[in-house]
Image (cartoon, rainbow, N blue to C red):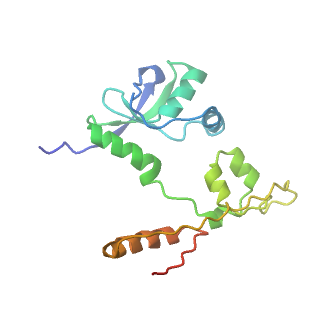
Amino acid sequence: MTKTPLTWTNCKVKLGDLKPWDDNPRESTQEDADHILASFEEFNQVEVFAIGPGNEVYDGHQRLGVLLKKFGPKHEVDARRASRELTAKERKKLVVLLHEGATGRWNVKKLGSWDAGELKDWGLSAETLGSLSLVGGGDEEGAEKTEELRPMNMARVLISFPVDASLEVSDLLNEIAKVQGVEIDYGAN
């Protein structure tokens, strides 16, 4: 059985008409909610909600909760409506792709010249901040110096594996070696 091709159309929808997904695996803290609201207040609605034909939310759950509290159920937002309902598997895949699988990664070398205090204020994760070696201020003259953020302490890991898994392990180690700050010493016994 082939699925109908999926298309998306722009629409307006009231917050109160949106139906959250009970199995949504994403969550946010109060700090995350504060960042969402601050972003909305400064830039208005930049990201649209992704919804199904029956107003089921595919993307935008955290924004929905924050905006409902701030504006109430009659407030209208921009959305992209799917031409058909997603299957359970498609919905799960979409959530992962939108939040992890197809979003790219930070280039910490480029990010390293930005102001650490601002990055923290804007909500950059502690994990990403910990991977940066920043001394605040960026290029701005007279900018306040922020505390230096040092890379996390190093850990040494011994990996043992059967010889017949060498190719797979080698591929994995090559991917890990691409992470800034990771050094791999190979050896055998």
Q: Position of residue 14 (x, y in %)?
A: 45, 23
| Residue at x 80% of width, y 58% of height | 137
Q: Position of residue 117 (x, y in %)?
A: 76, 50
Looking at the image, which residue sits at the far right? 142
In the depicted structure, whether residue 8 falls above or below residue 160 = above
Q: How many marks?
A: 0
Quarter of the image where the N terminus is located: top left
| Residue at x 19% of width, y 42% of height | 4
| Residue at x 14% of width, y 45% of height | 2
Looking at the image, which residue sits at the far left? 1
Comparing 149 with 143, the one in front is 149
| Residue at x 67% of width, y 56% of height | 130
Q: Is residue 4 left or right of residue 32?
A: left
Q: Residue 35 lies in what quarter of the image? A: top right
Q: Is residue 45 left or right of residue 163?
A: right
Quarter of the image where the C terminus is located: bottom left
Q: Position of residue 29 (x, y in %)?
A: 60, 34
